[in-house]
Each structure stands twice: as structure tokens, then as C-alpha cells.
Image (tube, coloured by chain):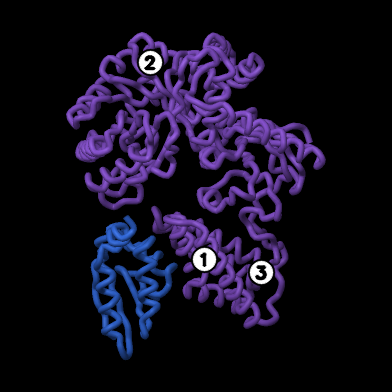
């Protein structure tokens, strides 16, 4: 096998046998005749019961919404309406696996006709069908492989349900054919500390059990001999141990401080030894709600996170919702292009009370815990928006107001924004999406969404320069801040803080500690001068 | 045949947790309960697939009906459940 390359999205190296997600079973072209209708009905009923039991078992391994979805799916598998449909088709001469397939297709059409939430349940029915048909045909069960030894998971892409069920003790690394730097796979892998490569063409052609080496930093996936596997894993473990030996606050070899902060979504993500929190996402309080959480409920939740951190600042991002992450109580209209629509701070145009309540709750939680709380708004495009937001923050009694730089307009106007706010933080995920006009969720465009794209780096450099001129803090809180090489580039540009998932902090800390500030500045020059993203990454790595 | 018209109290409509609760309660009754909406033929209220396929939203009126001994009592139980805002309640319990 030639060496494959994708986009490294979660650093670390490992090696092990590759196993693919099992594809759904396909029915044989020739339909066998039904000899005994009662026996076929019994086989279909037993298969659906097996699926229901399996889904109930899986639901017991997870919590919250994922468990509810699996429980409802389990109820659907043994549903009387579905059983009637299957029996009718067996009576019409269809064998069990075909009868299940046809009966489910009928129900899927009924759901699709209603639309909305109901249409999404068609995917649950497809999952029931695939599992029941696999059981009836004796085919491998679709879903995550279970080879009985630690393995490299290979998939087209991972769904949220796959990622919820993934056992981090059994999976060494993840490689997907699709998926971009901000896909579910990338975020999950980083949270679990698993090396991951996405957008890796050709990876599905690997034969199950082939030993491969995976490098989640460079994106290289290569087949190796079984004898080499142990050695690669041992070297990776030594490397990890070496990184962990570098301790203390983030700084370059010559002592220039670059605080390494955490991206968190709940108190459980907070490491009390961190230098601070660079991005506290507050959506968890709002998603799936039919009414807005009260000020008191928000205050309790914020205080829990503020209290979990020992010392250091906490940057809270106000609600980042929109038509792509809908909140029923806001009653937002459906949009043709939700990423370009009413989201983030724009929600305050029609619902100022949601922002005011949130700021009130943050201010009270800051008071009770005595934490150093900074607040920033997402999806800001103009200095006027930044000014209005900063006024609301100060009215709530919070001293430090900032905005996220995610829209190219805001990056170009960074100097004017910094006249009205105390700090800015660059969200490279959305800045890449909007600069490159490439949907974050579209795995086919992973190359365009690469944060090493010269246009994105140029905008980051421009914001960093504006920050230096104003003498104000410019942080990065996108996934790219956790790339040990980009961390050097950003530091060289004059970025003041880097915020990332806790699992990647040791690699970034070690990378900074091995380079001087002048070397970082040189890395920034090299990256900005490169003709394309791939060359930029290669040149910086070689200079390393 | 006994029947009741009920306005669906769950603001999100009959799906997710509210639908699962209604179906489990209907299945636990001693009589078979049918549920219908508008012109559609009534369906088995103990079938999650059939209940989801009604596509009932919060505020919609649904008709439940049953025959036989205990039908009235069973309909009372289900009508009371349907009228409640089940989603808000389960949320509060989980908070």
C-alpha cells in the first residue's frame, strides 16, 4: 500500500490493526421462495426482538439524549404497527429479511411525508432494518467493529451516535475518508486524546486487520509490518512521556509567556491546574430547551464552572445558537443558509432579553466566586455591534468585554473593534469557513478548511498586529490552537494566548518550550510566505 | 365506544420523550386505545411508530377512543397525560 495522507486533526502517533466500520448488509439479488410463512414470521419477530434488546443494552452504556434516542429506537423495533406490516408482506410471499425491508420503507415514507423532526426518525428505522437484516442473513452487524484487540478505527465518517458508543479503551486512533478539521470525529478524538486523521482518500480500501501506523500531527497513514507495531507504540509512549515532562506555564524557550488556556463546555472539562479558560461555551444550558433557562439556573451553572478553576481568567462566550443549532423558545425561522443567518450575537436583535439575562447571571456568578471573568460575543461583523455588546457587558457590571473574530469583516476591521472592546479572540474554525466560503460540515472540502490556508493566516496576522498596536489581548480559541506547529506560527505573529482541548496542551507546551520567540517569528514569516496550506505546513515542520 | 378530544399539552408535540411516555401508558391499559388526528384513520396508541406518524404538534387536538370494560377509566388516564406539558416536566426533573 502506498502511504496515505489526510488531515491530521488530533496529535499523537500509534500503530495497530485497521478495522473498518461494518457497512450495512445488502439483500441477495435472488429472492428465495417462502416455504413456511409461520416460520418466516417467527424469524422476523425474533430478529426485531434481538435488535430491540441490543439497542436497550447499548442505551445502558450511554447517558442523556443519546440514551433516550436509543430507547425510543428500541421501542420502534418491537412496534405492533411494524410487526403487522412485516406479517402482511410474509403472507404476500416475501421472506423475513425482505418483509422487514419493505415494511420499514413504508414507515420511512410516512415519516418523510410529515417532515421536520419526524423525518429524522427515518434514520432510526434504517438502523433497525440494517441490524435486523444482518441478523437474519447471518451478516456482520453494522456499526463499530469488535475485533477483540485494540485497533485503528477506519470509517467513511462517524455519526454522533457512533462517537457516543465508541470505547476509548479499544480504539487506538481514528481515520476517516471524509470529515474536516472541525468534524465530530476531530472534536471527539481531541477530547479523548486519540490520534486522528480525517479526509484520508483511499483509506476504505484497507483490508481489515492490516497493521498501520497513524500520525495525527502530519496526517500520514502507512501500512507497517506486524513486527514494527510494538516498536512504534513504545516510541509514541516515550514521546508522550517526554512531552508530559515539560511542565509549567506556556512559554517559549527564551521565556516569552504564551498562556495555554482550555476550551470547555461544562465544569467536568475544567482542569484545576490549567492557566485559565479561553473559551467557555454556554450552549449546553440552552440546547434542547423549550423555554429559556432562568437567571438563577444559569447563575448556578456558571458558578460551578468558575469555581472548578483554581486561578486564572475565564473567557465566557455568550450564547452561540442559530438556525443550524435551533432553540425552540427563540422561534427562529428556518433559513436557506443558516451559517450566514441569524446566529450568535445577531439573535439579540430580536431577543435582547436572552443576552441581558445571560450577562446578569454571569455577573452574579462572577461576584459569588470572585473569578476573573471576561465575556465575549460570537458572530460579530462590525465595530458598531462590538460597541453595543461592550455597553451591555459593562451595564451588567462586568469589567472586561471582548468579541470573537470569526467573520472576515471583523478581522479586516480589527483595529476599529479593538478601540471599543478590551480584547478579541479568533475562532479559526468559523474564520476558515467564512474566509474560504466552505461549509465546516462538508467533509469533501477539508482541504479548503485547512487552517494553514494562507488567506486565513493572513487575516490572523492582521488581527495580531492590530492587537499589538492597541496593546490588547488577542487569543486563538479554534481547534487550530492545539496544532503544535501552528502554535509556533501564531506565537510568532504576536498572538497572546492559545486556547484548546485539555488533551493537546502537553504537545503545544513542549513545542513552545523547544523554540525561541525569534524562531516563532521566522515560522510565521515562512507560513505567511508559502503559496499554499500543504507547503506552509511542510516548510514550518522542516524548519522545526 | 367511549372517546375524548384532547389538546396536546407538550409544546414540542408528540415525539421524543412525550411520545414514548404516551405509548408506554397506552400499552399498560387493559383495553386497546386508538388515537386519531383530523381526517386520518385512528391508529393504535400503543404503537410508537403509529403515534409518531400522526405528526401531532403542541396545541393540536387528538381524539382517543376505546371499547369494553374499563374503557372510560383508561381514557381518563391517557387524556390527563396528553394534556400535560410532558417535555417541560421531564426537563425539570432532569435539571
Q: CA distance from mark 2 to mark 1?
A: 52 Å
Percent from the top left, x then y, of residue A267?
39, 43
**What residue does disc 2 label?**
A412
Q: Depth-wise, is mark 3 or mark 2 nearer the camera? A: 2
**Disc on res. A136:** 3
Is A83 placed left or right of A132 in the picture? Answer: left
The quadrant where residue A241 appears: top right
Q: At 31% from the left edge and 69% from the top edge, which residue is drawn?
A: B37
The quadrant where residue A32 appears: bottom right
- Say which chain tag 3 marks: A
Q: Depth-wise, is mark 2 or mark 1 nearer the camera? A: 1
**Disc on res. A56:** 1
- Tell whether label 2 touches label 3 (CB within 8 Å): no
Q: What is the letter of the purple chain? A: A
Q: Nearer the viewer, residue A160 or A194?
A: A194
Tell me which numbered mark, 3 or 1, is placed earlier along the sequence: 1
Percent from the top left, x then y, of residue A255?
50, 14
Q: At 55% from the left edge and 15% from the top edge, which residue is drawn?
A: A253
Q: Residues within 10 Å of mark 2 (few under 14, many from 20)?
A: some
Tell me which numbered mark, 2 or 1, is placed earlier along the sequence: 1
Chain B: its colour in the image is: blue
Q: CA distance from mark 3 to mark 2?
A: 60 Å
Q: Residues within 10 Å of mark 3 (few under 14, many from 20)?
A: some
Q: Is residue B37 above or below residue A518?
A: below
Percent from the top left, x then y, of residue A48?
57, 70
Give the structural element (helix, strand or loop) at label 2: helix
Amino acid at each position: 500500500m502506498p502511504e496515505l495522507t489526510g488531515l491530521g486533526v488530533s496529535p499523537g502517533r500509534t500503530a495497530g490493526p485497521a478495522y473498518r466500520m461494518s457497512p450495512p448488509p445488502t439483500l441477495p439479488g435472488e429472492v428465495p421462495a417462502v416455504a413456511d410463512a409461520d416460520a418466516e414470521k417467527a424469524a422476523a419477530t425474533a430478529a426485531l426482538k434481538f435488535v430491540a434488546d441490543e439497542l436497550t443494552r447499548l442505551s445502558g452504556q450511554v447517558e442523556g439524549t443519546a440514551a433516550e434516542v436509543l430507547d425510543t429506537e428500541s421501542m420502534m423495533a418491537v412496534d405492533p404497527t411494524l410487526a403487522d406490516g412485516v406479517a402482511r408482506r410474509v403472507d404476500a410471499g416475501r421472506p423475513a429479511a425482505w418483509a422487514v425491508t419493505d415494511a420499514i420503507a413504508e414507515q420511512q415514507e410516512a415519516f418523510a411525508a410529515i417532515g421536520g423532526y419526524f423525518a429524522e426518525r427515518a434514520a432510526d428505522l434504517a438502523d433497525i432494518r440494517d441490524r435486523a437484516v444482518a441478523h437474519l442473513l447471518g451478516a456482520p452487524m453494522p456499526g463499530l467493529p469488535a475485533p477483540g484487540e485494540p485497533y485503528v478505527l477506519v470509517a467513511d465518517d462517524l455519526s454522533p451516535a457512533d462517537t457516543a458508543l465508541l470505547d476509548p479503551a479499544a480504539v487506538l486512533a481514528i481515520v476517516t475518508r471524509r470529515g474536516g478539521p472541525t468534524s465530530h470525529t476531530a472534536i471527539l478524538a481531541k477530547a479523548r486524546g486519540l490520534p486522528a486523521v480525517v479526509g484520508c482518500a483511499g483509506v476504505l480500501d484497507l483490508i481489515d486487520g492490516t497493521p498501520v501506523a497513524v500520525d495525527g500531527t502530519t496526517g500520514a497513514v502507512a501500512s507497517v509490518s506486524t513486527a514494527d507495531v510494538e516498536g512504534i507504540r513504545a516510541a509514541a509512549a516515550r514521546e508522550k512521556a517526554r512531552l508530559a515532562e515539560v511542565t509549567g506555564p506556556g512559554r517559549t524557550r527564551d521565556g516569552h509567556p504564551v498562556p495555554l488556556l482550555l476550551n470547555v463546555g461544562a465544569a467536568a472539562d475544567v482542569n484545576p491546574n490549567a492557566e485559565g479558560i479561553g473559551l467557555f461555551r454556554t450552549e449546553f444550558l440552552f440546547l434542547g430547551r423549550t423555554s429559556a433557562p432562568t437567571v438563577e439556573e444559569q447563575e448556578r451553572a456558571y458558578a460551578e464552572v468558575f469555581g472548578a478553576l483554581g486561578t486564572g481568567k475565564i473567557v465566557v462566550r455568550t450564547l452561540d445558537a442559530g438556525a443550524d443549532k435551533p432553540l425552540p423558545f427563540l422561534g427562529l425561522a428556518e433559513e436557506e443558509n443558516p451559517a450566514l443567518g441569524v446566529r450568535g450575537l445577531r439573535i439579540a436583535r430580536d431577543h435582547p432579553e436572552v443576552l441581558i439575562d445571560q450577562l446578569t447571571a454571569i455577573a452574579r456568578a462572577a461576584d459569588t466566586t470572585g473569578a476573573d471573568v471576561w465575556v465575549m460575543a460570537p458572530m460579530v461583523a462590525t465595530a458598531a455591534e462590538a460597541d453595543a455588546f461592550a455597553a451591555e457587558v459593562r451595564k451588567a457590571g462586568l469589567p472586561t468585554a471582548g468579541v470573537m473574530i470569526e467573520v472576515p469583516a471583523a478581522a479586516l476591521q480589527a483595529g476599529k473593534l479593538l478601540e471599543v472592546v478590551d480584547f478579541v479572540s479568533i475562532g479559526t474554525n468559523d474564520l476558515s469557513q467564512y474566509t474560504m466560503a466552505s461549509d465546516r460540515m462538508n467533509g469533501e472540502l477539508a482541504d479548503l478548511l485547512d487552517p494553514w490556508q494562507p488567506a486565513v493566516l493572513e487575516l490572523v496576522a492582521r488581527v495580531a498586529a492590530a492587537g499589538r498596536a492597541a496593546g490588547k489581548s488577542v487569543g486563538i480559541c479554534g481547534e487550530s490552537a492545539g496544532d503544535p506547529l501552528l502554535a509556533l506560527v501564531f506565537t510568532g505573529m504576536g498572538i497572546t494566548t492559545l486556547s484548546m482541548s485539555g488533551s493537546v496542551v502537553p504537545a503545544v507546551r513542549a513545542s513552545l518550550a523547544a523554540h525561541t520567540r525569534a524562531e516563532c517569528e521566522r515560522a510565521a514569516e515562512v507560513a505567511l510566505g508559502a503559496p499554499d496550506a500543504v507547503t506552509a505546513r511542510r516548510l514550518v515542520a522542516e524548519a522545526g | 365506544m367511549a372517546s375524548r378530544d384532547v389538546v396536546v399539552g407538550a409544546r414540542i408535540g408528540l415525539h421524543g420523550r412525550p411520545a414514548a411516555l404516551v405509548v408506554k401508558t397506552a400499552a399498560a391499559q387493559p383495553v386497546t386505545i386508538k388515537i386519531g388526528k383530523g381526517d386520518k384513520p385512528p391508529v393504535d396508541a400503543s404503537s410508537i411508530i403509529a403515534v409518531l406518524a400522526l405528526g401531532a404538534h403542541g396545541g393540536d387536538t387528538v381524539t382517543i377512543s376505546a371499547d369494553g370494560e374499563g374503557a372510560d377509566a383508561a381514557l381518563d388516564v391517557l387524556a390527563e397525560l396528553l394534556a400535560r406539558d410532558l417535555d417541560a416536566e421531564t426537563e425539570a426533573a432532569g435539571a
